[in-house]
Structure formats: C-alpha cells, structure tokens
Amino acid sequence: MTAKWRAGVAGTSMIAALTAGTGPATAGSGAGSPGCEQVSVAVPLTAGGPLDQRVAGTLCRPRGGAQAIQILVPGGTYDRSYWLRRGGNGPSFAETMVRGGYAVLAIDRLGSGRSSWPAGTAMRPDSHQASLRQVVLAARQGTLDGQRYRRVVAVGNSVGSTIIRGVQIRHPDALDGIILTGESSTPNERAFEEFAGAIHPAAQDPRLASRKLDEAYYTTRPGTRADWFYHRPGARAAVISRDEATKEPDTFLESLPPVTDNRLIRVPTMIMVGQYDRLLCGEGATDCTSTAALQAQQKRWYPDTPLEATLIPGTGHVLTLHRTAPASSAQALDWVRRNVR
C-alpha cells in the first residue's frame, strides 16, 4: 500500500487519494444559491462498460444560468461536501464559483458518499477515470440537467487532481481547463512512507464498520487527519473536528499515466499547493519556498502546457478547509476567468 499511496500524490496511482472532502451533503449545503439540486449520473466501472453504477453530486447554478460548468472532484476519504464547506470567514469554493457566474457540480467519487459502492473485486484500473469522463460527457451532451455546457473545467484535490490529469492525458478533448490542488509531480516520498501508518481498513474503523465494506476500502485512523491534512495554525479546531467526525471510506485501485505524460496536457492548467502540505513539501520534493520556485519546478513536468502554479501561505493539504480558503478560491476564480473563455 505504501508504494501505491506515494504514486498517487505523484500523480500516477493511489495515495493522493487521501485528501479532501467530508460527510454527506444536501442540496444547497454551503452553496449559497437557490439553484442547487441533487443529481445522479449513470457511469461505467471501466471504459466502454455498461452504465450500471451511479455518481451522485450537488449541482448549483447562478441566477440566469451559465454556459460553463466546473466539476469538483474530492480526494480520498472525502465526499462532495469538501467543496461546499467553509474553512474561513468567507464563501466556500462552490459559492465563490457560482457567484462568479459558473455552474458547479460537486461529486462523490465511486465508493464514497451517495455514489455507488462497488465491491473491491468489481473495481477496475480505470474505474475512477471512466466514471469521471462519463460525468464530463453528461455535462457536454445535456444529459446532466438538460443543458449542453460549452466549457467544462475540472477541479480536484489530491487524488481527485490525479484522476483529472489521467482523464485529460488519455482524452485530450475532455476538458477546457484543469485546476489541480493538493497534488504535485514531486511528492514527499519520506512523508508518504510515514503516512502509510495513518490508514487502515474501513471495516475496522468505529465510524464506518456498520457499512460492512470489503477489504478494498480504507480510511484514516481515528485522530490522524489533523497531522496529515492540516497546518493547525491555519485552520479552525471546529473544522478539523468535523472533518474527523465525517470522514468517508474510499477505494482506489487505479492505474494512472506516469507524471512524464503530463507533457501531453495542452489545456490551461493551474496548480495550487499549500505552503505546509506535509505530503508534498520538503527537501528533494515539492519546492514550497515561494510561488516562483513552485512554478519553475512544476513547469518542467508540463513543458507544453499553459501552466500557472501558486503557493498558498499558511495552508496544508486540504486547501478549502483552511482559513485561507476564501482567498485561494478567489485566485482560482480569477484564473478560470482569464484562461477558459
């Protein structure tokens, strides 16, 4: 498991999975708009397979509608509410984007929240990518809510970002722009070796045992999220406590393209990393000393991509759950406005 986790945040497999989201969301929870509704999309477990699974989400639209939609993909052991909750004194990520004129769809990935919980033996090496691509197609084709969105942007945290990259590498026409948070081409290898001890089977967790999930499902051990996902001085104790109390199970057996394939990405891309992201930052890993240093380092992996990278001060791995969230969300909105037309 250690190797898979390490590869995930690097952008090629599982461990970036453990980052971003929290318990069930209801229509309009934190979204700040009367145009929110629960939706569900039929998706496959593998490319070309039957649409026999469901991805659930909360869809919010600004007054007057929108021509562009952002699909928000949480990381491991989180659900859609990662994007709907407020970490600071200001709007949530979803609220920021809706107020900015964009529709947003915050989803539960397969195995979490209100989406399907397939047996581990049913999951395939492309299950998360195939299901996300189907959601993107639904937005473009009008089967999501009856509207054909002209522009589709995907925003991820941790393994959610990794899945988005995999979809865009394998399907270059899938998206018009991507925002990758809590993910890097240069993870902290030593930290991931340590982090392997912070996860255990979901069936053994007091909060999740009643779901009777099989051995493919995992979660964080009780009391470990603050140390790994947060920069404590930059987050509220109540937010961290709620995160711990509402964690989700997850399953991730994905086979993703290596980071060297990032060179195939041509659409505008934004990378956002917290200054104190324990899973990414460090000597020989992600350079979190300044935005300029981060930009120069990550650009080497995206030579032909219109890339912007930014370092978010006073922040750990789960950007939307820190006090800096309103400011980082505003940066993301500004980037979308400038780069996806």
Image: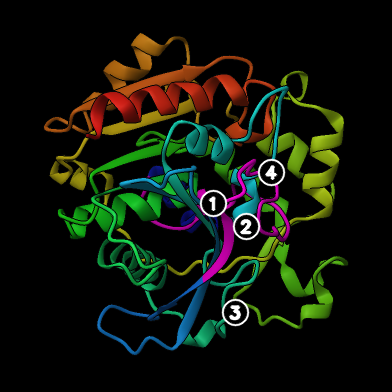
Of labels 1 and 3, earlier in sequence is 1
* Image quadrant occupied by the C terminus: top left
Colour style of the rendered protein structure = rainbow
Disc 1 target residue = 74
User: Which image quadrant for residue 49?
Assistant: bottom left
> In screen coordinates, is 39 left or right of 325?
left
- Tags 2 and 1 touching, CB below 8 Å: yes
Q: Earlier in the sequence, mark 4 or mark 1?
A: 4
At label 4, which amino acid type do we have? Answer: Gly
Above or below, 330 relative to 41: above
Which residue: 35% across, 65% down?
A: 129
In percent of width and height, residue 72 lies at 47, 49
The residue at 52%/28% (across/down) is 329
- Give 10 or 249, whichever is nearer the viewer: 249
Closer to the camera in the image, 221 or 271: 271
Where 198 sits versus 95, above or below?
below
Residue 136 is situated, as x and y percent measured from the top left of the image, at 32, 61
Asked whether the beta carbons under mark 1 and mark 3 sit within 8 Å of each other, the answer is no
Q: How many numbered marks, from 0 up? A: 4
